[in-house]
Image (tube, rainbow, N blue to C red):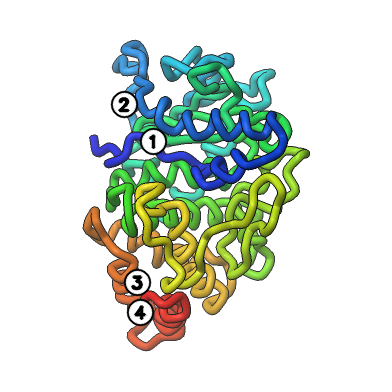
Amino acid sequence: MHLCHHPLCCFVPPYMAENLQTSDDPAVRQIAMASLGNEYRTARRLLTPQFLAPSLIGQVTGKERYVFDMAGASDPLPGKLLRQEGDRPVEDEAANEAYDHTGDVYDFYQAVFGRDSLDDAGFPLRSSIHVTDTFDEPMSNAFFNGKQMAYGDGDGNLFTRFTKSLDVVGHELTHGVLSFTSNLDYFDESGALNESFADIMGSLVKQWKHSQTVDQADWYVGKEVLGPGARIKGVRTLTGEKAYEGDPDFGTDPQPKHYRDRYRGGRNRGGIHVNSGIPNHAFYLAAMAIGGYAWEKTGKIWYATMKSGLESNATFQDAANATISIAGYYGNGSDEQKAVRSAWQQVGVI
């Protein structure tokens, strides 16, 4: 079984937590401390031996979901089994959200791309809910650790429970798909591509679920995890705009939309959560130019690129070349291919 090159793929990026650290509100600063530490502490969590028993290792293909309750604990994952495939809804709303959204993501990949779970062979979809950090503080994040999903409940002010957001679930499970396809390194441009593919597919599954055209979609990711105290529209946006600017808690969205503006430093594994804004915007531009339902053509081009044999250290240029080549499926010089090429040109990659 292939696993991610990285131990942990989190949805809320470190730069958001770093901005929260500068808040005048002590409660907000506490959220930041928990989030920043959590990325590294949770990387050491291990599955319990019981969870690896043959009865839970996916003996058949098809949809196979398990939801576990951590009951406010931090480890060891996965927790107490609360709901599994075919069970009726339970009283815990987060459990039902995790179960339903995971099913939606499975259905999206199966219906649109003909894929049977993360590995295309019925990989069991495991989720742990009510996860905290190792100091039992509320976890304002969700992550995929190479084996399963984990969701925090948020602080109740800036963030709410992460099971509420379909695009968050789609984002994290796409990290799992990537681990069985291109398995992109989790640093520099390959890491930014990893994050971008996850954002794109997370956005697409939400659009597919709600039958939204490119013009009807809002192109934000993470809107539903924002709590009543948050004054921003989303965690990220694939459009050419900033997701937020000058917010007293979150600051300004640092994601660039053009290659000349890319982050060149070493923080955040070479800016993987920052520079992912560039390929994100390229997808958005291509989708808007092609029109209709984004998953029908543009999404299929990007999914085929995920499977195309990209090297683990692939660059933005490599991804651009692959998408342009694959868009030739619609005909060399077709409108679809022109749209994809133009998108990468507009963001300065080619």
**Of the pair 287 and 329, the residue shown nearer to us:** 287
SS at mark 3 in the image: helix
Distance of mark 1 from mark 2, alpha carbons?
A: 26 Å
Distance of mark 2 from mark 3, alpha carbons?
A: 38 Å
The residue that mark 4 highlights is 350
**Of the pair 246 and 337, the residue shown nearer to us:** 246
The residue that mark 1 highlights is 8
Amino acid type of the residue that numbered disc 3 sits on in the rendered structure: Ala
Q: Residues within 10 Å of mark 2 (few under 14, many from 20)?
A: few
For residue 59, the mark is 2
Q: Residues within 10 Å of mark 3 (few under 14, many from 20)?
A: many
SS at mark 2 in the image: loop
Distance of mark 4 from mark 2, alpha carbons?
A: 45 Å
Of mark 4 and mark 2, the one earlier in the sequence is: 2
Of mark 3 and mark 4, the one earlier in the sequence is: 3
Q: Position of residue 42 (x, y in %)?
A: 42, 26
**In the figure, is residue 310 to the left or right of 298?**
left
Picture residue at 45% right of the left edge, 52% below the top: 273
Q: Position of residue 96 (x, y in %)?
A: 62, 28
Asked if disc 3 and disc 4 are in contact, CB closer than 8 Å, the reply is yes
Residue with the most extreme bottom position = 333
Q: Position of residue 176 (x, y in %)?
A: 37, 41
The residue that mark 3 highlights is 320
Distance of mark 3 from mark 4, alpha carbons?
A: 8 Å
Where 207 sits versus 180, above or below? below
Picture residue at 43% right of the left edge, 65% below the top: 262
Of mark 2 and mark 3, the one earlier in the sequence is: 2
